[in-house]
Amino acid sequence: MSKTILIVDDSSSLRTVVKLALTRAGYEVLEAGDGEEALTRLDGRKIHLIVSDVNMPRMDGITFLTKVKAHPSYKFTPVVMLTTEGQDATKERGRAAGAKAWIVKPFNPPVLLDAVSKLVLA
Amino acid sequence: MRSNGWSHAREKAAWCVAAGAWLGLVSAWLGNWPAALGPSVALLGLSGAVAAWTRFAPGAQASATQGDVGAGQEAADCLSEAAALWLTHLHTAQTQMREATEELLAGFSDILTQLDQIVASGPQAHEQEASRAAVLVRCESDLNGLMENFAAFVQSREQILGSVQGLAQQSGGLQDMVEEVAKLARQTNLLSINAAIEAARAGDSGRGFAVVAAEVRRLSGESGNTGRRIGQQIDELRTQMGEALDCARSRAEADGQVIDASGATIQSVIHDVEDVVKQLHERATALGAHGESVRHQVEQMMMSFQFQDRVQQIMEQVNRSIEQAVQQVDGALRQGQRLDRARWQQLLQAGYTTEEQRAAHGQSGSRSTPGAGAQAASPAAAQQASELTFF
């Protein structure tokens, strides 16, 4: 059975290209436009990994990440931040909040798939 | 405005005090009043400083005239109007870019789906190819079997031909026998003639013998006739057998040529079909490879649409920056105040999310040529693109 990955990004075009890369690698993909919408996807279904942007309306990626790590069912779900932010201070915020990896946009599909394959839950 | 009036009064008072102090100083010098000299000088310096500060201090200079304030208000109004228009244009551009990008991505996704079907059909085409090749082999085998049957048929006809030839040869032997029978008949006839002669010589005692001799003569005559008829029958049989043999030979020769030609045609057809199948296979392979290449190119092109995300973030930050900048400039113009440079720089940098923006800000801050910031931004962003960090 395919593994499920949740993509969280306010850019629909970005979600489309990430979904393209992941589905071609055999993953099933769920989408959300920001942190608030993504929390509604955490409804008990099995999610093997989350890919999240940082700068989003309503709820940014760091806040969403914090809530995921506090969720009883998803606190062990690995989260990869996919963002235009590349500064060390911002990365440190992500690491402190519980992110497992940080990828700076624009991304190359092999780089994303490398991170996903190494972190996705078994 | 009260603050401007207060500044004017202060400045005038300071000059009045300075004038008074100057008169006091002259009087002291003329009246030789050294005791009045010190306070006069101090008063003169103090009033001059106040007057100068009132005239030249920041804010005080900008609010020097009510005319300047009126111009500032008008500039603020124009700036607000322009900012509203700029923000509207930016929003229009953002919306159009987002919608066009989504439409293009949807189109490319459809193309990718079709390419997936084409490329996936490649292995199926190979399986069908193998099946067609097996069919070809089977057809070739069947046709070769047919040719063998034809060859066997020709061979059996040749065997029949051989048998007929044997019969013809044997009929020659029969003809010899017929000639011997005729010879015997002639000899028997001569014998009967001699017997009749001897019977006549014998007179009456030879009558019985003459009858026998006559009967023998009659029998030899009949056997001779029968022999001649058999000979004629044999001749006719030999003639017909000869004709049949000739016909069979010519038919066999013609059939052999037809079979040879058919065999050559069959081989040529099989060869041509094999060539066509081979070409179809090669074209299917090339088509599959081309489809794979096009699919890869389309995937790369779709990845390039990530630009829309970056542009969207930059334009949203510009929107917010324009709103805040207009608010600050508007307030400064209406109040006749200078802008706080440090606070202004913070405003410009607020909300940066990309390295291009930070690099451009750094280059623009050095007041280099326009666009230099954008030129410096690209390498900075390219260096960080797709950078992966594991925690």
Image (spheres, helix red, strand yellow):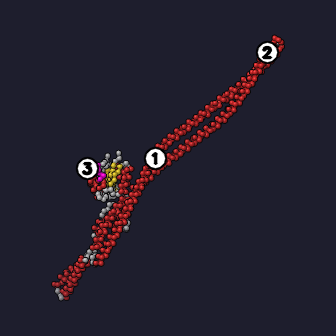
Whole-number angstrom distance, CA of label 3 to CA of label 2: 148 Å
Which residue lies at the image location 33% right of the left edge and 70% below the top edge?
B81
Badge 3 vs badge 2, beta-carbon distance below 8 Å: no
Of residues A94 and B38, the one nearer the viewer is: A94
For residue B216, say whether it is visible. Answer: yes
| Residue B151 locus on image (x, y percent) | 60, 35
In this rendering, is residue B160 above or below A41? above
Residue type at tag 2: Val
Q: SS of the residue at dot 3? A: loop
Among numbered discs 1 and 2, the one appearing first in the sequence: 1
Q: Quadrant of residue B273?
A: top right
- State the residue position of label 1: B122
- State the residue position of label 3: A72
- Region rendered in magenta: A40-44
Kindly report the secondary structure that dominates the magenta region of the rendered protein: loop
**Badge 3: how crowded within 10 Å, few (<14), some, or many (20+)?**
few
Badge 1 vs badge 3, beta-carbon distance below 8 Å: no
Queried whether the magenta region covers residue A43, the answer comes back as yes
**Badge 1: how crowded within 10 Å, few (<14), some, or many (20+)?**
some
Whole-number angstrom distance, CA of label 1 to CA of label 2: 108 Å
- State the residue position of label 2: B211
